[in-house]
Image (cartoon, grey):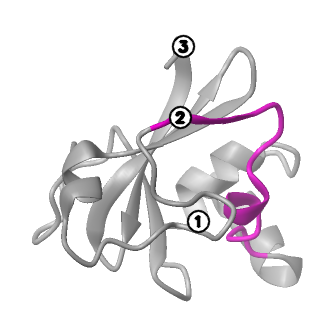
């Protein structure tokens, strides 16, 4: 992966699954090799099936962008963390630790979560 500005750890069902990065060219996501070798591993989304390749995009991947809350919850998060509404990656790292569903995102610089393997 190219030089990253910010990185997030992607968890699926509380299991470390990969890394999402903000880069000079846009965004990259790659599954963790250990996660790919797990029996019963599932993809983060249908648009990013399990593969050893890096997924790249000039805009934040729609699946990850869809995890960011909207409306009053987004406004509250922006005020609390003082994040610009247009900083979608910053919002992803701050507010998607405990999303509805199987996927969660943690800032790579955060401390390890008990019971979860960090990269």
Sooner in the amino-acid sequence: mark 3 or mark 1: 3
**Region of the chain picked out in magenta, as a range:** 53-69
Q: Nearer the viewer, mark 1 or mark 2?
A: 2
**Is 65 located above or below residue 99 in the figure?**
above
Sooner in the amino-acid sequence: mark 1 or mark 2: 2
Sooner in the amino-acid sequence: mark 3 or mark 2: 3
Q: Where is residue 85 shown, x and y percent of the image?
A: 86, 52
Q: Nearer the viewer, residue 89 or 18?
A: 18
Q: Where is residue 29 shown, x and y percent of the image?
A: 54, 41
Q: Residue at x 71, y 64 (%)?
A: 63
| Mark 1 crowdedness (10 Å alpha carbons): few <14, some 14-19, many ≥20 | many
Residue tagged 3: 2
Q: Where is residue 115 shown, x and y percent of the image?
A: 10, 72
Q: Residue at x 74, y 27 (%)?
A: 26
Does 41 lie within the magenta span? no
Indicate left or right for 58 with 16 as reference: right
**Is 12 located above or below residue 18 in the figure?**
below
| Label 1 element class | helix
| Mark 3 crowdedness (10 Å alpha carbons): few <14, some 14-19, many ≥20 | few
The span from disc 3 to disc 1 (Cα, nearest Å) is 25 Å
| Label 3 element class | loop
Does 61 lie within the magenta span? yes
């Amino acid at each position: 992966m190219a030089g990253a500005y910010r990185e997030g750890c992607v968890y699926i069902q509380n299991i470390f699954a990969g890394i999402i990065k903000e880069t000079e060219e846009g965004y990259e996501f790659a599954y963790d090799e250990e996660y790919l070798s797990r029996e019963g591993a599932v993809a983060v989304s249908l648009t990013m099936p399990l593969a050893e390749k890096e997924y790249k995009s000039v805009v934040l991947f729609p699946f990850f962008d869809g995890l960011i809350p909207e409306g009053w919850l987004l406004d509250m998060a922006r005020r609390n963390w003082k994040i610009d509404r247009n900083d979608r990656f910053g919002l992803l790292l701050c507010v998607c630790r405990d999303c509805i569903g199987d996927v969660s995102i943690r800032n790579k610089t955060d401390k390890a979560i008990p019971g979860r393997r960090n990269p």
